[in-house]
Image (tube, coloured by chain):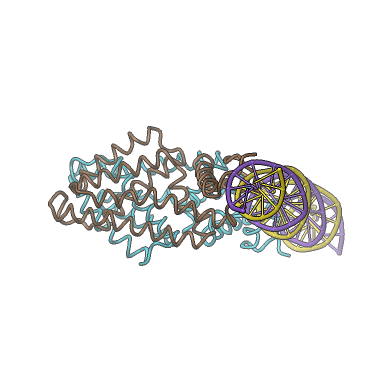
Chain colours: A brown, B cyan, C purple, D yellow
Amino acid sequence: MIKKSTRIRKEEIVQAALEVVSSKGVRALTIAAIAESAGMSEANIYRHFSGKDELYSALADFIGSSVMGNAATIAAGGRKPLEKLETIFFSHIKIIAENPGVPRFIFSEDVFLGHPDVAKSLTLRIGSYVETVSGVIAAGVREGELKPDILPRETALTMLGMIQFTALRQTIGVLNSDITVESRKLWTNFLKLIS
Amino acid sequence: MIKKSTRIRKEEIVQAALEVVSSKGVRALTIAAIAESAGMSEANIYRHFSGKDELYSALADFIGSSVMGNAATIAAGGRKPLEKLETIFFSHIKIIAENPGVPRFIFSEDVFLGHPDVAKSLTLRIGSYVETVSGVIAAGVREGELKPDILPRETALTMLGMIQFTALRQTIGVLNSDITVESRKLWTNFLKLIS
DNA sequence: GCCTCGTGTGATTATATGCTCACATAATAT
DNA sequence: ATATTATGTGAGCATATAATCACACGAGGC
């Protein structure tokens, strides 16, 4: 029996939870499944998290900070708007491709109908994500890289919808080709739409 | 105690199930919840359906035929492509607004990770839906209503992503304004993107 | 009217799941 | 070295859920 600090164990447990979601879905995110994936007893999960609610919260924080913060960093960079947009798009796709659990968790019913506090925090993050992308698009319009008459917010929502729908299609297995190939086609076409 | 024919009861049960999904999510789609919503005993559900699998199958058929068949009918009509596209968009939004359970069920994990047969049938329907919309867009391009260089399939996916994302945002409560208002803005902007 | 067969139900079972508890043991301070 | 504290675990509890069964009953054919 090996003992580690709570800090380490918490990270391990969150990682294990994310793996479970990626491989078997949010529906299968049971304490037993997490414990098995993390290689420890169920009771030990409760030694580090008060319950499922706190675990969900930690998972949301991890996903939120590591994933959505990414877009903000890119947006704050010094490149041209269109370049930023493309980078945001493909890094988002990459995250989805590597870790299907991320979009599944973020938009899961378990979170939004079962854990209101977590839902609230995720809602805020999604909102700021939309604003970030909207800002980049608005800048692109101002600088003449994009069509002059498009609405930044609605265009941002369209782009995020495109990404989210790709994630969904991947989850349900409708994507026959690779997600990277598919996303490249989608981006090429989106460029024609916005510029 | 009132007795009705199996045919009637089956419809009632499917309706009750859809109501449960709409109000409490797929997660809450338990036999007990359906029984309560339909006003009958749990055991009576099994009198008409062999189990949850058959029930899911019936629900998928109902949604598929009544909802997705709609787009095909519109597409087969005699109007101009752009008009058709707009009609498809707003009737899809209307369905979502009136019955949030529809998109929830169609893209639910419970279906795609728990009921493979149902998933397969839904996958087929989604595919033909994408093709239908793609066809309308292709016609629009040919007739000069839409930009000449856009890709029909990718543009169709973008449009459906926009719809699906709206449904998701409605489900998780990110939509502050009404879904009809939101969808009008999105469509206005989408028109600018494609024409 | 009444007989039969399909329709309806309360009680029950088996299993899964979130969670607790008494107890064991490794790490750490003294 | 020993005591203390935090970490780890098997066993068990309460509840929820899918499914079954014996039995009750109502509608349509005669």
x, y percentage for residue B172? 44, 59
Q: Which corner quadrant of the image does residue A34 belong to?
A: top right
Question: Does B152 sit left or right of B27 as displayed?
Answer: left
Q: Nearer the viewer, residue B11 or A184?
A: A184
Q: Nearer the viewer, residue B6 or A80?
A: A80
Q: Residue at x 61, y 62 (%)?
A: B37
Q: Is residue B12 above or below residue A19?
A: below
Q: Which corner quadrant of the image does residue C20 belong to?
A: bottom right
Question: Does B143 sit left or right of B14 as displayed?
Answer: left
Residue B174 is at least partly visible in this image: yes
x, y percentage for residue A10? 53, 49
x, y percentage for residue A48? 58, 52
Quarter of the picture holding the N terminus of chain A: top right
Q: Nearer the viewer, residue A21 or B123?
A: A21
Q: Is residue B175 above or below residue C23?
A: below
Residue B61 is at least partly visible in this image: no
Q: Which corner quadrant of the image does residue B128 belong to?
A: top left
x, y percentage for residue B19? 54, 60
